[in-house]
Amino acid sequence: MKKKVLILSGGISKERLISLDTGYQVAKELKKNGYKVKISEPDNNLEKNIKIFKPSVIFNALHGQFGEDGYIQSILERFKIPYTHSGVISSSIAMDKEISKKIFIKNKIKTPKYFTYSYEISKPDLIKKIKRKLKFPVVVKPLNEGSSVNVYISDKTNLGKILYKLKSYKKVMIEKFIDGREIQVAIMGDRKLGAIELKPKRKFYDYQAKYDSKSKTKHIIPVELPKFKFNQLMNAAFKAHKIIGCSGVTRSDFKYLNGNFYLLEVNTQPGMTKLSLVPEIALYKGITFINLIEWMLKDASKKK
Ligand SMILES: Nc1ncnc2c1ncn2[C@@H]1O[C@H](COP(=O)(O)OP(=O)(O)O)[C@@H](O)[C@H]1O
Ligand SMILES: [Mg+2]
């Protein structure tokens, strides 16, 4: 008998639309392959939906706040039903760019230099601090968003405007801008699955470059790197996945400059539409979309 799968998608994060797309596409693929599927929002009806549908496994297709940060995972633990991807603590660590960077640094995984800013010093003082510690340009970003939402590159002139836009976060990350190649790595359990390079036509790999097909980001697979460099990259992603304690599939985002890989973040809920990066890397390795989803379901069952 095929498993009954409840797919969690939507939610209230800024990545709601991406999650709905992931959920819909995973559901379509599972239905095509004979599974019983129900899609549910992570709202007040979730418990009722679970009681009525009685899924054997939950596919977490959420992204961003409350879906990728340990919050929904801790609710799912209560139902005692296996769910895909990472658990409570690893999800919350990976979602917090400041905590995860501290862990990367402690474990000798290179990451761009940074400091956090809580609007505690004046703009002129901040500019001085940036010049002293990082140098312009810098990247200003929230600590816990995804999909490049509210990620900005700042030279000195637009810093004030950007900080004003991000005021509601109360605390932001200011990071050295690494003007290098954009390479992302997929890890699948104990397997270093592969990597893909992205060449956005835009200034950086922003929201539009990620999701608007007209913006035409070029996807390059296999990534052109000498073998030993490629291994170094895969090892860094694998190490990050393991030290954070991730499960299932993750996707780590790197910048590559002057022979160094700088880890920006580990994504515990990477996009899973047919055209997303992890499915693309998997396919290159001969793992079809349904194979990948079925592996995730099996891995979820094993986890609990
Ligand atoms: N320090 C940096 N140097 C250069 N580009 C960066 C830097 N930080 C972020 N970016 C660009 O912004 C994108 C999104 O940043 P990231 O830290 O991965 O946040 P998100 O969680 O929104 O994906 C990256 O893929 C990259 O293109
Ligand atoms: Mg990213």
Image (spheres, rainbow, N blue to C red):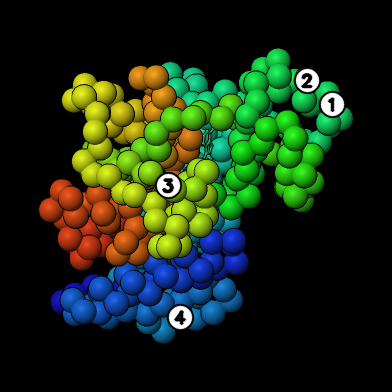
Question: Pointer 4: what residue?
Answer: 49
Q: Position of residue 71 (x, y in %)?
A: 56, 56
Please, is residue 77 above or below residue 174 in the view?
A: below
- Dot label at residue 124: 1
Type of amino acid at the residue the image marks with label 4: Asn
Sequence-first tag of 1 and 3:
1
Q: Is mark 3 within 8 Å of ligand 1?
A: yes
**Are the residues flagged by discs 3 and 2 in contact, CB closer than 8 Å?**
no
Measure how far apart labels 1 and 3 are at the Cα level: 33 Å
Secondary structure beneath dot 2 equals helix
Question: Pointer 2: what residue?
Answer: 128
Please, is residue 130 above or below residue 120 in the view?
A: above
Measure how far apart labels 4 and 1 are at the Cα level: 54 Å
Going 46% across and 76% down the picture, which residue do you hit? Answer: 40
**Are the residues flagged by discs 1 and 2 in contact, CB closer than 8 Å?**
yes
Sequence-first tag of 4 and 2:
4
Type of amino acid at the residue the image marks with label 3: Pro
Going 26% across and 54% down the picture, which residue do you hit? Answer: 280
